[in-house]
Every structure is written in structure tokens, then in C-alpha cells.
Image: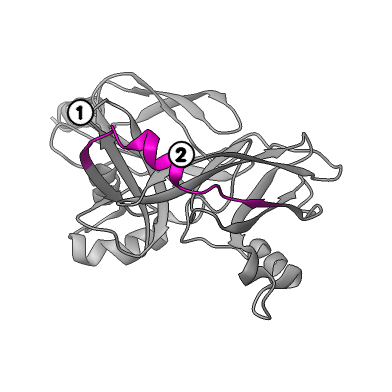
Amino acid sequence: MMKQFIFTLAILMTSLCVNAQTPSVDYNVDEVGTDFITMTFMPNADAAGYAFCLFEAGTAEQQFAMFGPWMGFQTMGDMVKAWGITQTETYQYTWTNQAPGSDYEIYVQCWDADGVDADMIIIPVTTASMGGDGEAVMTIEIGAFGGDPEYGYYQWVTYIPNEEVAKHRDMIILKSAYESAEWGEENVLNYLKQDNPYDPYWDQYGIDEAQWNAEPDTWYIAFSIGMNANDEWGPLASVEFKTPGTTSIDEAAADKQVAGVRYFNMAGQEMTEANGLTIIVTTYTDGTTSAVKVMK
């Protein structure tokens, strides 16, 4: 009788082990470039679904602590499900517009048929670096001037790095302001070398074709400085230029009618009106658009 009981118990325990749900997601890092990451996610048969989300390395816990309480996230998995991409089968995804030579973490949360979360999977990935060990040299080219009196004028400036540049930072400033006691070369250098985590466009990679808010018939100076792969700053590049008068621009724009205007902050979120540093996108009835960065 005892042998029969032990035998029956062993069969029951084996059955429980076989039927236990162990959801998991396998993955493959398919390709990593300077500004993109491509991965494939492969859930097992016990995974009813999964979600994945990319974070800059070391920031996921900070964001959970910041947003979790007021967004109702009880666990990190809740945040990954809300912010990430949800799938149920094998899926390949590519993140673009990432920073070169930067560390990221992909958080993967899967769950079983009863909605019970498995352990979080954290995948570290580093994008390929740009630049070299030599002197980081920037070249500045002054482009077209455009706009209209109603929505403002703008100046195109192109900043071109040499092959040694890993990243660069760019600006324009009124020549009169630069020549004042407030600015000067030393303060421009300090300004450009200072990190600005609140501006997603502060660090530039590769050629930067920038459109700046500018007034007609006015002197400006464009500046740029590059950093190489060893975090060494190169020389400060600068070009003085004067914007043209408005006569030819206004005549060219006279036949253009505005179809709509949209406002975006520096994080790409649309706003109802210009507020602070704003990108104003104007669409015309002929299908053309213009975008200008302004400070309101």
C-alpha cells in the first residue's frame, strides 16, 4: 500500500513539473550600427505575450521611480508593458536614431496564460562608435535664408565633421552679442562643452543641417566644436555671415499662402502654441513646408 502511494505521488509531482508554465523569451542581437540596433525576439510556448522597451543604460530604474507612482506602475514590468512594444510571436525590431558609442539596455517582460509575469530579462547593447584618435575638425557652410514676416525668418547652416569627430555641438549667435562682455570666445567654448541632457539635439553625429531663427540684414557668427573618440575636444570653428535683406524673400513668398502651423517642443511633442525653445512647422497651400527653431 505504501509503495502504491509513493508511486502515485511521484507521478503527480512529475505531472505538475511537466505542466508548470515557464514563460521565457529568447533573443538575438542581429545587427548594431552607430545609430541603430536590430534584434529578434523569440518567445517559448509557455509565453502568452511579451513586451520590450529600450532605455539608456542605468536609467530604467530612475524612470520607474520618477513616473511609476503617478502613472500607476506597480512593477518595472508594468512600465515596460505601457511604454514598450507588445508581441505574442517571433518579432524583429530596429531602433533608429540612437547615439553612437552609447550603452543601452533592452528590458523584456513576458507573462504566461494566467497573466503572471516571469523574471525580467535585461539585454545590454552598445552602439558602434564614431570618430578616431586624431584632431576633431569641424567645417561650417552657410546656406539659404528664408521665411516670412508673419512666422519669422530662418537661416540654414551646415556643420560638417571630419572622420575623427565622434560628436559635435553647434550654435549661431548675434555678432553684437558675441562681442559683448557676456560672451566672447571663452564663454562660447564653455557653453558648447557643457552637457545639456534636456536638449535631445545638443549632441550631433555626422553632418548637421541646422535651421536657425534669424533676422534679416543682420550679422551672426556660427560656431561648432567636435570631440574625437578619446573625448578630446578639437578647435573651435567659426564663420561670420550677414543675412540678406527681405525684399527678394518677401517677393518670392508673396504668392505662398499658409495652410497650417504646428508647434513642437525639443522632445518632439506637439504644443498648442510656441512656448520656450520651439520648432514651428509651417505648411503652405502649394504643399511645401518650412521649419524654424525659435525662442518664445
Q: Where 284 sits versus 166, above or below?
A: above
Q: Quadrant of the N terminus?
A: top left
Q: Which quadrant of the view contains residue 66?
A: bottom left
Callout 1 amino acid: Ala
Q: Where 70 sits versus 210, above or below?
A: below
Callout 2 amino acid: Ser
Q: Nearer the viewer, mark 1 or mark 2?
A: 2
* Disc 2 secondary structure class: helix
Mark seen at residue 48: 1
| Residue drawn 72% across the image and 39% down it | 161
**Magenta span covers which residues?**
240-260
Q: Is residue 242 magenta?
A: yes
The mark that comes first in sequence, 1 or 2, is 1
Residue 278 drawn at (x, y percent): 36, 56
The answer to whether any part of residue 106 appears in the image is no
Residue 42 drawn at (x, y percent): 36, 21
Q: Quadrant of the C terminus?
A: bottom left
| Residue drawn 22% across the image and 59% down it | 74
Would residue 295 appear left or right of 48 to someone viewing this image? right
